[in-house]
Amino acid sequence: MEHVWNICRRIRPVRTSGLNYVTGRYRVGHYSTVHSYTSNRSPRGAENDARSGASHADLVYCMDLVKKYDFANYLSTLLLNSECRDAAFAIRAYNVELAQIRSSTTETMAGKMRYQFWSDAVDLAFTGKPSRHPVVQCIAATARKHPLLTSSLLKDMLNGRANDNKTNVAFETVEELEDYSDQTVTAVLLAVLRCMGMRSPDVDKAACHVGRAVGIATVLRSAPMLIPHGEIRLPRELLSKHHVNTRGLSAAPAGLDNVAFALGSIANTHLENARSLSLPRDAVAPLLPAVAAQRFLRQLERAAFDTFDPKLQRRDSTLPLALLWARVAGSL
């Protein structure tokens, strides 16, 4: 069975000991190179038998879900070839459903029950007996149409979030953060690539590097929203190294910019490594989330690595053009 950790274990972690940590305010250009189904069924959707395939209403549900909760990836998915676009929206909608469990449940047992629902739903989808949930219907249709897609990749996405929800503590090391990114981001990219019929060492390595960069960028972007509530997602090894006091925070603590610089440098390195690989032109579109991650890292650098800078929380109005340009140019 294909699991994300068997693929990404070949990727050597970026070591923080080799990075140039920020000691003051940095100028631009100083990077080291080194997210319950309650909708009503539409009449058209109700006409489809559970085993006959996903309806148009099911697909619209998936697209709307991704657009609402994962807009940057909604934009990049629109740029995929029509042959795999529906499959990608199904996979990303499934990922959104998993991501919502952590933020919408306060009781551990309730979270476990929802994860179990999705685990069973994946099994049923791949055995041709999907439930009537629109995301499950689309996953089942995707599994039938794209034989390279395996249930193990979707289970990896689930297990990564379920284990994270179970512990609910900060990552101890950067490597733990990268492992989490492999399961929650890289697995999504690999699943989309498989739906495009792509599997090769360089393509898989690029997906691992991009997944880790996107995962790190997501943690950095979410820091100002989580820290005031006492939820620290940044690796403890970096917080300790830079003497960041995380108790009773309501604003950016001293030294947090150093941590942001270190993580930003690691993410930047992963993106550079992905760009250094020889990729077929068709592999660029599924890896377009790298573009949004790179743009966020540049904005973070312009903000002197202050993750609490309000500008970093604004929607990137020129991202659609940047994604389109990367798609047309065939480069990350």
Image (cartoon, rainbow, N blue to C red):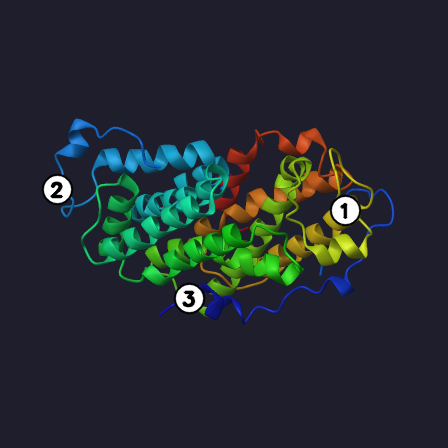
Q: Give the crowd class for mark 1: few <14, some 14-19, many >=20 residues within 10 Å.
A: few
Mark 2 or 1: the one toward you:
2
> Could you give the CA–CA distance between mark 2 and mark 1, rounded to whole angstroms?
56 Å
**Are the residues tagged 3 and 1 within 8 Å (C-beta)?**
no
> The residue under label 1 is which amino acid type?
Gly
> Does label 2 or label 1 sit earlier along the sequence?
1
Q: Residue at x 43, y 38 (%)?
A: 74
In this view, the residue in front, 316 or 282, is: 316
Q: Residue at x 58, y 30 (%)?
A: 315
In this view, the residue in front, 282 or 329, is: 282
* SS of the residue under disc 3: loop
The answer to which image quadrant residue 231 occupies is top right
> Could you give the CA–CA distance between mark 3 and mark 1, rounded to whole angstroms?
37 Å
Tell me residue 77's x, y (percent). Answer: 41, 42
* SS of the residue under disc 1: loop
What residue is shown with label 2? 49
* SS of the residue under disc 2: loop
What residue is shown with label 3? 3
Tell me residue 276's x, y (percent). Answer: 59, 62
> The residue under label 3 is which amino acid type?
His
Tell me residue 239's x, y (percent). Answer: 75, 52
> The residue under label 2 is which amino acid type?
Asp
Tell me residue 107's x, y (percent). Answer: 47, 42
The answer to which image quadrant residue 96 occupies is top left
Q: Give the crowd class for mark 3: few <14, some 14-19, many >=20 residues within 10 Å.
A: some
What residue is shown with label 1? 29
Q: Residue at x 51, y 66 (%)?
A: 8
Q: Residue at x 41, y 44 (%)?
A: 110
In this view, the residue in front, 153 or 27, is: 153
